[in-house]
Image: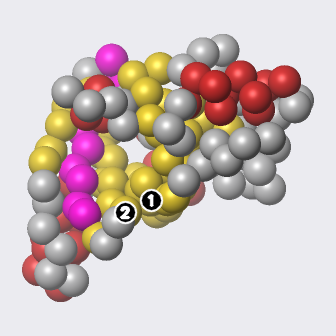
Amino acid sequence: MKKNITHVDHIAIATKDLQKSLEFFEQALGLKCDHIEELPERGLRVAMLPIGEARIELMEPTREDSEISAFLDKRGPGIHHIALASPDASATFDALKERGVAMTSDSVQFGAGGSKVAFVHPKSSGGVLLELVEQVES
């Protein structure tokens, strides 16, 4: 199997208060947010903070049925997933499905910044939710 993963794209942190979390990362750690984006179809508002070659993604729900609402209710704020960069998320998704890896959806979807994303179900990856991310040039 060819190399489908190139590096860690980001580590996502679920938060109930995006502004409060941003203040900590910017004021206490000196990181700078490069953009905030609303993803209405997923019920999220996200902020990206570059750190080295990766980023920290802060995610806040914008509605009660968002993708992270149940996570926050059950576990509280904290690391939600690790995103791994792939040059071709669709090919990586297909290769994983062929190997019997459980995915959380039936196809690649769109994520922040117009990226292509798919999630590996934690039952296949030792309890860790993994996101495959293909950055799409705009």
Q: Is residue 74 visible?
A: no
Tell me where residue 31 sits by quadrant: bottom left
Rendered position, 65 above or below 13: above
Upstream in sequence: badge 2 or badge 1: 1
Rendered position, 69 above or below 109: below
Tell me where residue 12 sits by quadrant: bottom left
Q: Residues under labels 2 and 1: Cα distance? A: 8 Å
The three-letter code of the residue at mark 1 reads Ile
Q: Which residue is mark 2?
A: 54
Q: Name the residue located 15 percent from the left edge and 44 percent from the top edge.
A: 36
The disc label shown at residue 131, or none: none
Residue placed farthest to the right in the image?
A: 100
Q: Name the residue located 44 percent from the left edge and 35 percent from the top edge.
A: 134
- Closest to the camera, between mark 2 and mark 1, is 2
Give the residues drawn in magenta, as a range. 41-50
Q: Which residue is mark 1?
A: 11
Position of the N terminus, as image quadrant, is top right
Residue toward you, 21 or 39 = 39
Determine the secondary structure under disc 2: strand
Location of residue 55 in the rendering, given as x and y in whole percent from the top left corner: 33, 60
Give the image's coloring scheme: secondary structure
Q: Is residue 4 visible?
A: yes
The three-letter code of the residue at mark 2 reads Ala
Location of residue 6 in the rendering, given as x and y in whole percent from the top left corner: 54, 53
Residue placed farthest to the front in the image?
A: 2
Which secondary structure class fits the magenta region best? strand
Give left or right: position of 123 versus 78: right
Cβ atoms under marks 2 and 1 closer than 8 Å? yes
Whether the magenta-drawn stretch holds residue 103 is answered as no
Residue toward you, 4 or 108 = 4
Determine the secondary structure under disc 1: strand
